Amino acid sequence: MARQSSEVSSPMMRYVLRRAIEGLLALLLLAVVVFLAEHATGSPLRYFVAPDESGKDIAQQVHLLGLDKPLYVQFWIFLVNASHGNFGNSFIYNRPVIGMLLDALPATIALAVTALVLTIFIGVPLGVLAAIRRGSGLDKVAMTASILSMSIPQFWLGILLIVLFAADLRWLPAFGYGAPVDIILPALTLSLSILAGMVRLTRSSMLDVLDSEFVNFARMKGLNEWRVIWKHALRNALIPVVTFAGITLGQLLNGIIVVETVFAWPGLGHLTINAAVELDYPVLQGAVLLDGLFFLASAFVVDVTYAWIDPRRRYAR
Amino acid sequence: MRGSTHAGVMLADHLSAAEPVAPAMRRRRSPPWFPITVMVVMAVCAVFAPLLAPHPPTELNPVIANSPPLHVHGYLLGTDTLGRDMLSRLIYGARTSVFIALIGLGFAAAIGTSIGVASGYLGGRVDGVLMRLVDVTMAFPTILTALVIALFLGEGQATVILAVSVTMWATFARMIRGDVSEIRGRDYVTLAKIAGVRAPTILRRHVIPNVMNTLVVVATLLLSQVILLVASLSYLGVGLPPGAPDWGVMISEGQSVLFTSWWISLFPGIAITVVVLATNLLGDWLRDASDPRLRQL
C-alpha cells in the first residue's frame, strides 16, 4: 500500500485522523440526504404559501426562502446554518429547532446513562456467575433468559412492563418525567435488550480467560478463588466487554428511539419520531443530524479506544 | 484474514449462542422441531390467509368492538377497537411479515452478494472502499436509516421493504466477501484462469455456487432482525399505515386501550416473540450444522 508523504508519523495518530475524516464524511453524507429529503417530495414552497396566493406573492416567497438559488447553493446555506446550530423554526410549534433539541437532550442522556449503568451492574456479575457455574441451573436460566430477551420486541416489552408494574401492581409510574422513579421503567426496558448481549459476552470471555495459564498460576500461588475470579480473571475478561459498546451503539440508539416513544419520554428519540410523523421537516433535519452526530462521535471514541488497547488495529486497513 | 475494521466482528464470536466446539467433537443434533413447526405454521398462514381467516382482516364491526377473547361466537381471540377480528388480523399479519421479509431480504441478498463477490474477487482498493461502506452501514442505527427513507417515500410497504434492503445488505456482503476471497485462491479457480476461462464464467460456475450455503444461513440469521425491524417501524408510525394487518400496527393500536382491552396488544406481541425466537434458534442451528466459521455473525 502506497503511503503518501504524510506529516503525521505515528500510526496511532494516522489512525485517529483517518477515522475522524471518515466520520466527518459520513456526517456530510447524512446532511446531504437530510437536505434532499425536504426537496424530494415536492418543493418546500408548499409549506409556506397558501393555495390561493397570487403569482407575485409566491415569487416573493420563493426569493425570501432562497428557493430561486441553485440547489448546491441552497445546500451550502443549509450546511453553514446547521453548523451554527440554526435549523430554522418548527413548522408545527413555531419555535427555533435548536431550542427544542437542547430541551430534549437531558432526558435522553439521563435515560441512556441509567440504562448503561443498569446493564453493566446486572450484566457483568451475571455473566461471571454463569461462567464459573457453567452448566448449572443458574447458567441455563441466564442463557435462556438472554435468548428470550433478544427475541422480544422492545416496544412490546415496555408495554408489558407498564401493564405489570404500573397498572397491576401500581408500584411505579408508567408515564412521566421529572421524579426520579419515572426513569425506572424506561431504563429497565432499554437495558434488558442490551443485557442479553452483555451477559453472553462476559460469560464467554470469562470462560476463555479462566482457561488461561495466568489464572492457573494465580491459583497455584495459593490465592483464594474469590480473588482469582473477581480480580485477576475479570479484569482481563473485561477487555472485549469494553469494546462491546461499539456494537451496541447502533442498537442503543434504536432502543432509545423506540423506548422514548413507548413511554412518551420527552427526549431526542421521541422528538425525532414525532417530527417524522408530523412531517415537521426543520425539526426532523435537526434531530436526525444530531442523532447521527452523537452516533458517529461515540463510534469514533470507541474505535480509537479500541486501537489504543489493541495496537494491531492501528495498522488495519 | 478479513480486512474489515469493525470492532464488532472480532467480538461477534463471543456473542454467539453456540459454544466453540472442535469439528470432530460436534455431535449430530436432532432437527430443531420447535422452529420448524413455527416456520411451517407461518408459511401456511401466509399462503392460505384468505382461506384460514374467519373474517376479512379489515372488516369493521362496531357492534362487537372491544370484545374479549371467547366472548362473541366466531371471534375466538376477540376484536379490536373497531370490531375487527383479532384472529383474522393475526393470520393476515403473518402474511404481511412473510411478504416483506422475503422481498426485502431478497433484495438485500442480491445487492449484498453482488458487492461481496465483487469485493472478494477483485480485492485491493475496491475491496477497501466497499468494506468500509459495509462497516458504516452495519453500524448505523437501522431505525434512523429507515426514518430517512420514510422521509422520501412516506409510510407504506415500499418504504419498509427498502428499509430492510438498505439496512441488511451489508451483512450479506461481508460474509460473502469472506467466502469469495478464500475461494479465489483455491486450485480449481487458478486452473480455470490458466485454462483461459473468462472472469464472469468463473464467477458463475465456480464462485457463486460455493457461496450459496453462506447465503442461506445468513438469510435465516437475519430473518429475526428483519421481523423485529418491520414491527418496530410500524409501531413507530413510519412503517405500514394504521389499519394495515400487521403485528406492529396492531400492538400500536392496542396501546391506547391497554388497561381495558389488553388482548389487542398481547396477541400480536406473543406472535412476534414466538416467530423471532424460532428464527433465532433455527439460524443458530443451521449455522452450527453447516459451517462453524459463520459463528462470526
Image (cartoon, coloured by chain):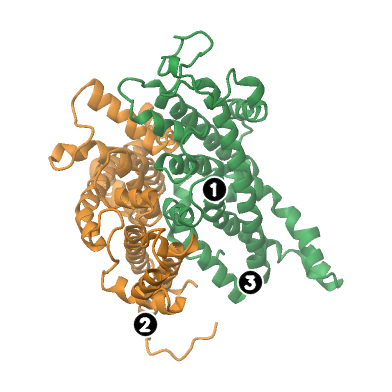
Chain colours: A orange, B green
CB of mark 1 within 8 Å of CB of mark 2?
no
Q: Amino acid at mark 3?
A: Gly
* Res. A301 image quadrant: bottom left
* Label 1 element class: helix
Of A202 and B193, the residue lying toward us: B193
Q: Quadrant of the N terminus of chain A?
A: bottom right
Is the residue B278 above or below the residue A107 in the image?
Answer: above
Dot 1 and dot 2 within a common chain: no
Is the residue B277 above or below the residue B63 in the image?
Answer: below
Q: Residue at label 3?
A: B123
Chain to which mark 1 belongs: B
Q: Residue at label 2?
A: A10
Is the residue B177 above or below the residue A155 in the image?
Answer: below
Q: Residue at label 1?
A: B295
Is the residue B192 above or below the residue A121 in the image?
Answer: below
* Label 3 element class: loop
Q: Amino acid at mark 1?
A: Arg
Chain to which mark 2 belongs: A
